[in-house]
Image (cartoon, rainbow, N blue to C red):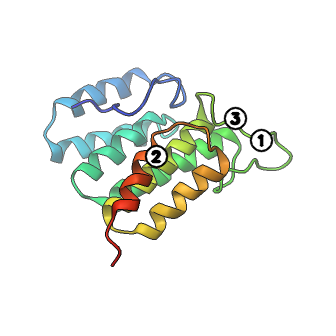
Amino acid sequence: MNLFSGVASEAFSGGELPSVVHGLLRQAAAAGPAERGALLWTAQAIAPQALALYVALAKHHAQRREFELAERAALRGAHEAACAAGLDERGRPLGAGAAPDFGVDGPARFWLFMQKALAFIALRAGDLDAAHDRLELIETLAPQARLGDEVIAALLRAAPDD
């Protein structure tokens, strides 16, 4: 299992991971699904600012159809990224800060990536309105971000209307 598939680099997700976290990730990659979640949450507790962990957690839980846990991981990742980038929960700069550059690797781009993850999780969980809202936020803030959100938009368009 590649715990970082979908993440271009550690720079994209906020920098290098502590060595203890690398060890836990190696263990998680070799572990069975039940143990993997515990190892990933342990790594997150040790290094909550290590943004890459939230991608691994969200993917792990989404693959297991544990959408509440996947959403919790993505929301925490978005929160940590927003704090690091000086953004509010809608991606706007706090105070008189400069507008974020979502095209550059770092916490602001990672925050945007977590919005994509939240859209995907909502889509998989059947919450089409929430998925649409997240995609709309991405389009409003960074229409040229090229995060792969167009794939989620296509899946959302193809979803049956209930």
- Quarter of image, res 71: bottom left
Which quarter of the image is occupied by the C terminus? Answer: bottom left
The type of residue carrying mark 2 is: Glu
| Observer-nearest of 152 and 11 | 152
| Observer-nearest of 107 and 127 | 127
- Contact, mark 3 vs mark 1 (Cβ under 8 Å): yes
| Residue 106 percent across, percent down from the top left | 59, 30
Residue ID at (50%, 31%)? 13
Residue ID at (34%, 61%)? 158
- Contact, mark 3 vs mark 2 (Cβ under 8 Å): no
Residue ID at (42%, 37%)? 46
127 versus 144 height, above or below? below
Q: Which residue is mark 2?
A: 150
What SS does tag 1 mark? loop
Residue 30, can we see it?
A: yes
The type of residue carrying mark 1 is: Ala
119 versus 148 height, above or below? below
Q: Earlier in the sequence, mark 1 or mark 2?
A: 1
The type of residue carrying mark 3 is: Asp
| Residue 82 percent across, percent down from the top left | 62, 46
Distance from Cα at disc 3 to Cα at disc 1: 7 Å
Q: Earlier in the sequence, mark 3 or mark 2?
A: 3
Badge 1: how crowded within 10 Å, few (<14), some, or many (20+)?
Answer: some
Tell which tag, 1 or 2, sits nearer the viewer. Answer: 2
Distance from Cα at disc 1 to Cα at disc 2: 24 Å
Badge 3: how crowded within 10 Å, few (<14), some, or many (20+)?
Answer: some
What SS does tag 3 mark? loop
160 versus 116 height, above or below? below
Residue reaching furthest left? 32
Point out which mark residue 99 bears.
Answer: 1
Count of numbered labels shown in the rendering: 3
Residue 41, can we see it?
A: no
